[in-house]
């Protein structure tokens, strides 16, 4: 539940545990290289399909413009120029904003990543920042698209041995090999941005963790004041949800102790999960009520 943390590696597995300064152990499972590659291919296919659909739509509109009875040729020319500008902007956004838009969302995942069950996360317990997402996606241009331009230029020139083509192929091969040369399967963009890609737990929260369900006995066991709930925000709620999903005993104990110390509310031994489920339900309900009133608390540092 803190912003700075240390990472405890677990060799030869994809399991990682981040230890916060408060002593809370947060487990993660790194995404496989295959899942990351599949997610990228899915996203590229979706981007390509969106580009084709947009181009065909604008061509259809352009056909209607040229056939329309507009006064003077200049009106048609201006309309066609506007469509060209729209096409250029749309291609730029599909090409550059696709990954930024989805990875900056609450899920931290593009459609391809959501299909393969993975997401981008900051290494540590801090929030995934806009700067980190921008950095990792700028580096993707260097890793993937720039060598593709060199290779495509060599192919279009009709020379298989063109220096630019070979340089692009070697460049591309180096960056493709990079995730296989480190234990966390990080690409260069992850190293620079301080991110990694982790698996999203597929198991759904039980009814006891749904604020839309009737409050269970766990919720009746502890009633927290608005002041006790106000110390945390949406980010801490997500962290607590992840801990409850995982259900590991040591993590539950550590998080329950951290919250108990923070709000000054003790709980009996063996009641860690009941305590956390109660706090989760009531914190989520208070945050949702705040959103309905136009107030949002992103994390514990927000006013």
Image (cartoon, rainbow, N blue to C red):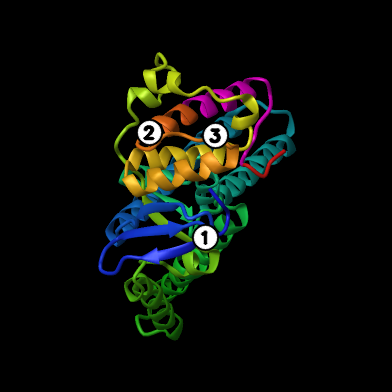
**Helix, strand, or loop for circle 1?**
loop
Q: CA distance from mark 2 to mark 1?
A: 26 Å
Which is in the foreground here, disc 2 or disc 1? 2
Q: Residue 232, can we see it?
A: no
Determine the residue positioned at 30% across, 60% down.
14
Task: Give the image quarter of residue 289.
Answer: top right
Q: Residues within 10 Å of mark 3 (few under 14, many from 20)?
A: few
The residue stretch that appears in magenta: 281-299
| Residue 14 in sight from this viewpoint | yes
In front: label 1 or label 3: 3
The secondary structure type at the circle numbered 3 is: loop
Question: Can you tell which mark lies on residue 5?
Answer: 1
The x, y position of residue 112, in whole percent, is: 37, 46
What residue does disc 2 label?
271
- The mark found on residue 265 in the picture is 3
The residue lying at 59 percent from left, 37 percent from top is 263
Q: Quadrant of residue 205?
A: top left
Determine crowd level at label 1: few under 14, some 14-19, many 20+ residues with C-alpha closer than 10 A: many
Residue 294 against residue 181 in the figure, above or below? above
Specify few, some or many for label 2: CA neighbours under 10 Å numbering under 14, 14-19, or 20 or more: few
- Give the total of numbered labels: 3
Which numbered marker is on residue 201?
none
Q: CA distance from mark 2 to mark 3?
A: 13 Å
In the rendered image, residue 222, in percent from the top left (x then y), is placed at 48, 24
* Residue 37 is inside the magenta segment: no
Please tell me which residue lies in front, 151 or 298. 298
Residue shown at the point (42%, 78%) measured from the top left: 171
Q: Main secondary structure of the magenta part?
A: helix
Snapshot quadrant of residue 184: bottom left
């Amino acid at each position: 539940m803190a912003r700075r943390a240390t990472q405890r590696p677990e060799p030869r597995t994809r399991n990682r545990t981040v230890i916060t300064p408060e002593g809370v152990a947060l487990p993660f499972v790194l995404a496989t290289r295959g899942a990351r590659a599949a997610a990228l291919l899915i996203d590229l296919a979706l981007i390509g399909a969106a580009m084709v659909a947009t181009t065909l739509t604008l061509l259809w509109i352009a056909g209607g413009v040229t056939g329309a009875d507009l006064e003077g040729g200049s009106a048609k020319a201006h309309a066609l120029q506007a469509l060209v500008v729209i096409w250029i902007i749309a291609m730029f956004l599909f090409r550059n904003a696709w990954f930024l838009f989805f990875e900056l969302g609450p899920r931290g995942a593009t459609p391809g990543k959501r299909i393969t069950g993975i997401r981008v996360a900051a290494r540590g317990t801090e929030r995934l920042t806009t700067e980190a997402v921008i950095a990792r996606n700028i580096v993707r241009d260097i890793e993937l698209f720039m060598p593709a331009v060199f290779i495509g230029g060599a192919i279009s020139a009709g020379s298989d041995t063109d220096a630019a083509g070979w340089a692009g192929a070697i460049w591309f091969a180096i960056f493709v090999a990079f995730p296989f040369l480190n234990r966390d399967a990080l690409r260069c963009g992850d190293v620079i941005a301080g991110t990694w890609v982790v698996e999203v737990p597929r198991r759904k929260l039980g009814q006891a963790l749904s604020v839309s369900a009737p409050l269970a006995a766990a919720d009746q066991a502890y009633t927290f004041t608005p002041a006790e709930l106000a110390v945390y925000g949406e980010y801490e709620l997500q962290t607590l949800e992840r801990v409850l999903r995982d259900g590991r005993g040591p993590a539950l104990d550590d998080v329950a102790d951290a919250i108990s110390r923070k709000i000054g509310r003790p709980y009996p031994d063996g009641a860690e999960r009941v305590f956390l489920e109660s706090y989760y339900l009531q914190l989520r309900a208070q945050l949702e009520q705040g959103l309905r009133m136009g107030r949002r608390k992103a994390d514990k540092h927000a006013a």
